[in-house]
Amino acid sequence: MPSPVLPSWLALSAAALLAACSPTFNWREVPVAESGLVALLPCKADRANRALPLGAESVQVDMTGCEAGGVTFAIAHAAANSPVQAEAWLNAWRTATRSQLAEAQVAEAPATVQRATAVPAPLRLDAQPSQQGAAPVQVLWFAQSQKDGTVALYQATVLGKPSSPETAKTFFEGLHLP
């Protein structure tokens, strides 16, 4: 006769699943722009677009994001005409983001995103502000070549301190390129 006690690994998995399904974070798949990226967001997405200065150019950027548990989750998307332009925009985007972080402790490292281009390469930034009460920031930049020769460029951001480190990990690992 089988034991009514659940194996410990199954109980732990169930507990983790229940925690991930908390009312604060209601995860759902959301398509981003028309480029094919699907993001996993913990709340109902809002969308907007605006012009963003990237270097000497003003670039149209589509944004998809939401706020849950006092944390903002966002994905910005721009379409570059070539890999050279995409790399220039990524560098300008990174420079602009770093300049907004003032005196924060910033760490950058190469990142991995399945199906992302090697140039420009995926890059991760983690910033811990030096000011009391300021929100930490985690950013992931990556790109994907499109069939029409353009390059879809993305910036995924977590602004704020999630109640669990698994929250930001779930968001970043939930970004899927076609």
Image (tube, rainbow, N blue to C red):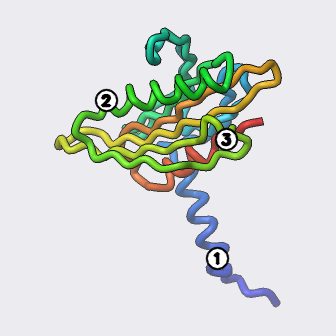
Q: Which residue lies furthest to the left in this view?
A: 132
Q: Are marks 2 and 3 in contact (CB under 8 Å)?
A: no
Q: Closer to the N terminus: mark 1 or mark 2?
A: 1
Q: Which of 60 and 119 is in front in this view?
A: 119
Q: How far apart are marks 3 and 1 (CA)?
A: 38 Å
| In the displayed structure image, the side of residue 112 where residue 55 appears, left or right | left
Residue 51 coordinates in the image, percent (x, y): 48, 9
Where does label 2 land, which residue? Answer: 99
Amino acid type of the residue that numbered disc 1 sits on in the rendered structure:
Trp
Above-or-below relation of 82 to 130: above
Q: Which of 63 and 113 is in front in this view?
A: 113
Where does label 3 land, which residue? Answer: 118
Q: How far apart are marks 2 and 3 (CA)?
A: 25 Å
Which residue is drawn at the image coordinates 67% and 36% (left, top)?
29
| SS at badge 2 | helix
Q: Closer to the N terminus: mark 2 or mark 3?
A: 2
Where does label 1 land, which residue? Answer: 9
Above-or-below relation of 97 to 134: above
Which residue is drawn at the image coordinates 31% and 28% (left, top)?
100
| In the displayed structure image, the side of residue 12 where residue 50 appears, left or right | left
Which disc number belongs to residue 150? Answer: none
- Nearer mark to the viewer, of 1 and 2: 2
Graded by Cα atoms within 10 Å as few (under 14), some (14 to 19) or many (20 or more), the crowding at tag 2 reads: few
Amino acid type of the residue that numbered disc 3 sits on in the rendered structure:
Ala
Q: Which quadrant, please, contains the N terminus?
A: bottom right
Amino acid type of the residue that numbered disc 2 sits on in the rendered structure:
Ser
| SS at badge 3 | loop
